[in-house]
Amino acid sequence: MKILALDSSTRIGSVALAEAEQLIAQTELDVDVTHTEKLLPAVEEILKKTGWELENIEGFAVAIGPGSFTGLRVGLATMKGFALSHNRPLVGISSLEALAMNGVMSDIPVAALLDAKRGEVYAAVYQFERGIIKEILFKEQAIKPEFLSHFLKKLGPSWLIGDGALAYREFFEKNLKGQTFFPPHSMMRLQSKWIAWLALPKLQKGEGKNWASLTPNYLRLSDAERTR
């Protein structure tokens, strides 16, 4: 199955092409411009590079959040357009789950953290076993790093992955001495190849046909909604 996967939930988005479990190509979006300006050119570029055509894509996958409100809306609208025009299935994948896949081979828990601004992070903690998620130890939520650290302290040693981990690295290192591990910066980014990976079994089972009802998972209200 040929899959086109997209992440626009984070500042550094990406596009990937995969065939079954094999990654064919992946490219990052330009962080100096908005996803609105760069997303379609990035899709065109990766298709041209691989010689693939949108008509040949058998399934689409997109990160549905949490993350940037604007980025999520743009990414989902784009992929819905592709699904509609080519009559193909589209599945949504958790941004945090895809981010945590960078630590898929870990024996200890993996905490996926995205910077949610306002002094919060979007967070979830997973336990992997043999390349798959065995258990969700901490369900997705927007939370203060102080409260998350209480949970992590009880949990024991864990990996902290994502721009939320980077934003509060000094805090976590100070409050969770000897219990925090941070991967290289290259593994801190959400990669759309994992979106394709997670989407594959869903698409193979026939999911993604009712994509019209797919909505972003914001986890919290926007500033405008909070003000209102």
Image: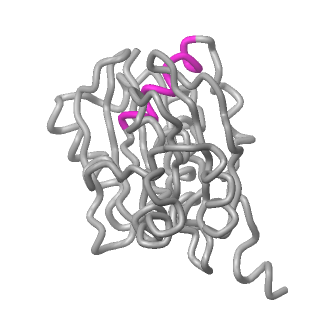
Q: Is residue 46 left or right of residue 212?
A: left
Q: How was this image coloured? A: one colour
In the image, residue 126 lies at what x, y percent? Answer: 58, 36
Quarter of the picture holding the C terminus: bottom right
Instruction: Provide residue 225's location: percent of width, then percent of height.
Output: 79, 78
Q: What residue is at 59 percent from the left and 32 percent from the top?
A: 91
Residue at left offset 50%, top offset 43%: 157
Q: Which residues are magenta?
A: 193-204
The residue most toward the front is 178
Q: Nearer the viewer, residue 179 or 203?
A: 179
**Relative to 35, 184 lies left or right:** left
Q: Residue at x 26, y 46 (%)?
A: 44
Pinpoint residue 98: horizontal percent, then vertical percent: 48, 39
Q: Is residue 36 magenta?
A: no
Q: For residue 199: magenta?
A: yes
Q: How many marks?
A: 0
Q: Residue at x 56, y 76 (%)?
A: 117
Closer to the camera in the image, 143 or 196: 143
Q: Is residue 81 visible?
A: no
Corner quadrant of residue 58: top left
The kind of secondary structure the magenta stretch mainly shows is: helix
Instruction: Tell me: residue 219, above or below residue 108.
Output: below
Asked if residue 126 is positioned above or below residue 72 in the image, the reply reads: above
Residue 166 image point, x, y percent: 40, 65
Foreground of the two, 44 or 173? 173
Q: Quadrant of residue 83?
A: top right
Residue 184 appears in the rendering: yes
The N terminus: image quadrant: top left
